[in-house]
Amino acid sequence: MSLLYEEPLNLLKQEVHEPAIYNAIITAIATGHSHMSEISSKVGEDTNVCSNYIKNLINLDIIQKKTPYGEKASKKSIYSIEDDCSVC
């Protein structure tokens, strides 16, 4: 059972150079911190730093960015764990 428990972190280690920060960002989002300011505060990094990590996580299809319709300002964007149920 512990092999499956550690599998997400093992996969993340294969894809990125600093898995601890990526894991902290994923954990922050999974625990309800959905705005960039909340995520960066929880992780303890500047929003500019977190932004780069988040872009990588989006490219890996691990998280997704949602912006309200008609809004261009990223301050209203929220982040969530990608949940593609088409593979369920």
Image (cartoon, rainbow, N blue to C red):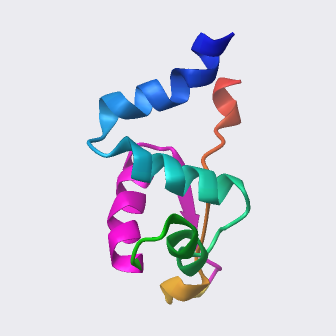
Name the spot of residue 14 as percent of width and height, x first. 32, 28
- The structure residue drawn at horizontal position 63% and vertical position 58%, both measured from the top left corner, is 29
Q: Is residue 78 above or below residue 72?
A: above
Name the spot of residue 43 as percent of width and height, x first. 51, 65
**Quarter occupied by the N terminus:** top right
Of residues 50 and 61, the one nearer the viewer is 50
- The structure residue drawn at horizontal position 64% and vertical position 38%, both measured from the top left corner, is 84
- Is residue 28 left or right of 11 when viewed as pictured? right
Residue 12 falls in image quadrant: top left
Of residues 11 and 42, the one nearer the viewer is 42
**Quarter occupied by the C terminus:** top right
Task: Give the magenta part as a residue range.
Answer: 47-69
Question: Is 32 colored magenta in this rendering?
Answer: no
Q: Is residue 61 above or below residue 53?
A: above
Question: Is 60 colored magenta in this rendering?
Answer: yes
Name the spot of residue 50 as percent of width and height, x first. 40, 68
Of residues 69 and 34, the one nearer the viewer is 34
- The structure residue drawn at horizontal position 56% and vertical position 69%, both measured from the top left corner, is 39
- Is residue 52 left or right of 71 when viewed as pictured? left
Residue 69 falls in image quadrant: bottom right
